[in-house]
Image (tube, rainbow, N blue to C red):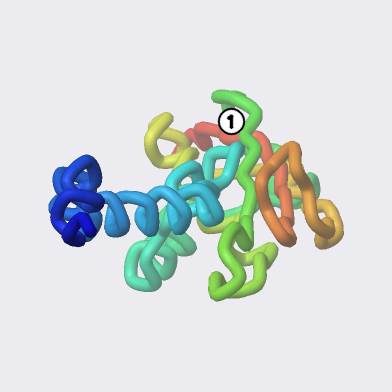
Amino acid sequence: MRHLGYVLAPFASFLVLAPALLALAAGVLVAGCNWYWFIGPFVEVIKVDQLTAEKLKTEIPVYDRDQLKGVRYKVVQPLEATSCKNLLWDPPPTEQDATDQLRFKARTMRANGMMNLSCFTKEGTSLYKNCWQSVTCNAIAIQVSP
């Protein structure tokens, strides 16, 4: 009768590596099921903290057509921003978040105002954007002369 060591000898190296292979397999499984954590939204989303958002509200106001009558301004560039709920635990998207992102973008272009602000209603799940929900806003960045 042969002893157990003789039978298990071909598998000895596998048994030594089994814990490491099990950990690797578990990691691949978790990463494979949750790959979207690493990808994020497919649209640009800028995280604007509360303090910066409050500061930008005063620096970059949103003008309507009546406020711009008789005011000299120059169009800088059209803007678009998306507030996206990418992960289940992310906060719901809001027009305010998208508008804060627009103001942030306008500041990077040296604009000091925005006009023609419009937001789309809250969208449901979008594979194109990789968002469970989203709100997209558009505006035109402008440079208002003093």
Quarter of the image holding residue 108?
top left
**Residue 19 falls left or right of residue 99:** left
- Which of these two is toward me, 31 or 105? 31
Residue 134 sits above or below residue 38 on the image: below
| Residue 120 spot, x, y in % from top left | 83, 52
- Which of these two is toward me, 12 or 109? 12
The residue lying at 47 percent from left, 40 percent from top is 105
Quadrant where the image shows the N terminus: bottom left
Quarter of the image holding residue 97?
bottom right
Q: Amino acid at mark 1?
A: Tyr
Q: Local crowd at mark 1 within 10 Å, few (<14), some, or many (≥20)?
A: some
The residue lying at 55 percent from left, 70 percent from top is 90
The residue lying at 24 percent from left, 51 percent from top is 7
| Residue 48 spot, x, y in % from top left | 41, 59
Spot the residue most to the front: 1
**Residue 136 falls left or right of residue 16:** right
**Residue 116 falls left or right of residue 36:** right
Q: Which residue is mark 1?
A: 73
Quadrant where the image shows the C terminus: top left
Count of residue discs:
1
| Residue 140 spot, x, y in % from top left | 66, 35
Secondary element under disc 1, as helix, strand or loop, is strand
- Which of these two is toward me, 133 or 139? 133
**Residue 145 falls left or right of residue 95:** left
The residue lying at 49 percent from left, 42 percent from top is 39
- Which of these two is toward me, 69 or 129? 129
